[in-house]
Amino acid sequence: MALLSIENVRKEYQVRGKKVLALDSVDLTIAEGEFVTVVGPSGCGKSTLLNLIVGLMRSSMGRIVFRGAPIDGITTKIANAKGQPLKSVLRHFRQAYDHTRFIVGHNIYFDTKVISAEFLRNEIQDTFTDRSKLDTIGLSVDYCAIKGYYSYKYPTLSELNQKLFNKSFEGAHSSVVDVRIVARCFWELIRQNIIYQDNYGFWRAKTT
């Protein structure tokens, strides 16, 4: 079974009343352990493809399957029937985070680029990029101490959870599950005094 399978994916946008074709008839299969780089000029659809893979938007046609199941279990048919317009979702999202002091995430700086691109694409003022953020992936590198090629590698959310709680969790890559696990890991990192907030309000990893 392939790790990730992209099957006949097409994505169209409506930009200022005009239809823009970002992706057309994309097919790609990635095996477990395979390293893949997406390369192309600006505007060729790289960000759009990544947004589709992580479930931030729905395709106009085709499907994306991760470990044998559609991304987040949402098919194009379900998304079209029950999904909300992206612009409306972005506006509600902005209202929610405007009331926060800082935002916590795992590899949140990747998410920041994706979200900022969608604000720009939907002509909504981006106040997310400059919001204070705490990224558990960077702050837990030394704590997890997973050997990489040159030094310790960034831990996945599953690896961080395993290190903190000595157990795995089901439902990785489901957005609802991932949010709950990130929150649990964040509070546990604080409880164990692995991370702390300094006198200037910056979050730091405790050094030994």
Image (cartoon, grey):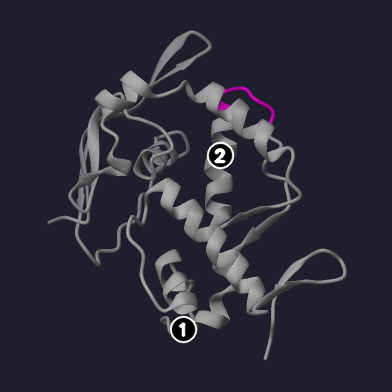
Which mark is first along the chain, 2 or 1? 2
Tell me the tag on residue 182: none
Q: In this rendered view, identify the residue nearer to me: 80 or 13.
A: 80
Q: Where are the magenta residues, as a range?
A: 120-125
Q: Is residue 163 left or right of residue 140?
A: left
How would you classify the magenta stretch by its main secondary structure? loop
- Residue at 54% x, 76% y is 141
Visible residue check, residue 154: yes
From mark 1 to mark 2, how far is it between C-alphas?
A: 31 Å
Q: Is residue 89 magenta?
A: no
Secondary structure at badge 2 equals helix
Quick check: 145 above or below 61?
Answer: below
Label drawn at residue 115: 2
| Along the line of sight, the residue nearer the viewer: 117 or 94 | 94
User: Which one is in front, 185 or 77?
Assistant: 185
User: Which residue is pictured at 36% across the width and 70% down the height?
Assistant: 168
Q: Amino acid at mark 2?
A: Ile
Name the residue beneath numbered marker 1. 150
Secondary element at tag 1: loop
Q: Is residue 80 above or below residue 39?
A: above
Residue 145: x, y in percent?
49, 84
Quarter of the picture holding the N terminus: bottom left
Would residue 106 be visible to someone looking at this image? no
In this view, the mark in front (1 or 2): 2
| Left or right of 50, for residue 100 | right
Q: Position of residue 194 (x, y in %)?
A: 64, 79
Q: Quadrant of the C terminus?
A: bottom right
